[in-house]
Image (cartoon, rainbow, N blue to C red):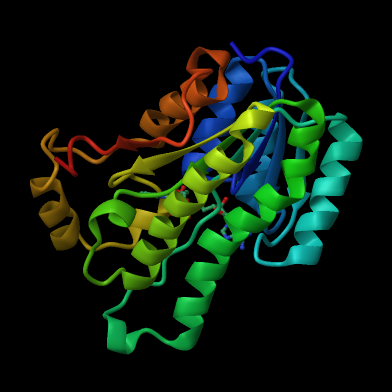
Amino acid sequence: MLTGKNIVITGGSRGIGKAIAMECAKNNANLAIIATNNSEAAKNTIEELKAFKTNVKLYLCDVRNPEQVEGAAQEILADFGKIDVLVNNAGITRDNLLPSLSIMDINDVIDVNLKGCMLVTRAFIRNFVKNRSGNIINISSVVGLMGNKGQTNYAASKAGIIGFTKSVAKEYGRKNIRCNAIAPGYIATEMTAVLDEAMTAEMKKQIPLSRLGNPEDVAKLALFLASDASGYITGEVIKVDGGMYV
Ligand code: NDP
């Protein structure tokens, strides 16, 4: 389904990003994985991806840092020649009630989730324009659509991604560049593993399908958006949330 496509995935070392990478590799895509460090998780992910016999490489880069982002993009373009799909998935949480959020909690979440998505997209947009073809998939969240107590910083960053996605879709549609967002609900990864049992049980009550999602549930949609099967879809925000938003 993705044979010959070169795909960049930020935060592809673990969780949802890893599941997207696995789904893409299974479908014969070449992968440039971005993570902050060469952790055991990142090393294992690269090894698992290589089993699919596609071209896979890890790039270390903090998506908050414009110089690092530009440097990684140049390196990736030199290695792969061109990029077909960019998945902006890197993200963090620093949850707390508004008065208890430190300036760092606010800055870090906005910088990684929103500014990071913008910087990485900016770094690859010329490549897409030059190729007269491009496909950007941004990982937002249902809380960017519905809000959530204790997550004002995170929800604002994810809502920002939606505005960014729609703007890129409008600005670059005529250059044959698509830009869509995925809004996952409550997905079982390291990010949500920190929540206590009572909170998880409370969340489940809000989900009509009565279960947490798996990273693979999100990856299946990312595969569709990365493929030409979704060629006439742009500017959309698609939820994968077990009905949580309904
Ligand atoms: P994880 O915590 O499991 O993984 C986060 C990934 O982001 C890691 O690969 C990490 O790399 C990378 N990352 C974090 N900070 C940076 C940075 N500054 N620069 C580059 N990479 C970075 O998270 P999830 O898989 O759960 O989440 C993935 C995305 O999905 C996030 O954007 C999240 O907001 C979103 N999401 C998640 C939901 C969930 O319920 N889990 C629900 C809705 C949206 P490293 O290994 O180097 O730290």
Q: Position of residue 238 (x, y in %)?
A: 35, 35
The answer to whether residue 134 is visible is: no
Residue under the image location 55 percent in, 52 percent down: 90
Q: Which residue is outermost to the right?
A: 78
- Quadrant location, the N terminus: top right
Q: Position of residue 97 (x, y in %)?
A: 26, 80
Residue under the image location 29 percent in, 52 percent down: 145
- Quadrant location, the C terminus: top left
How many numbered marks are there? 0
- Residue 106 occupies quadrant: bottom left
222 in relation to 26, above or below: below
Residue under the image location 79 percent in, 27 percent down: 131
Q: Position of residue 111 (x, y in %)?
A: 56, 69
Residue under the image location 65 percent in, 26 percent down: 176
The answer to whether residue 66 is visible is: yes
Q: Going by the image, does 4 lie left or right of 169?
A: right
Q: Closer to the camera, 191 or 124?
A: 124
Q: Position of residue 5 (x, y in %)?
A: 71, 20
Q: Going by the image, does 85 lie left or right of 203?
A: right
14 in relation to 98, above or below: above
- Residue 197 occupies quadrant: bottom left
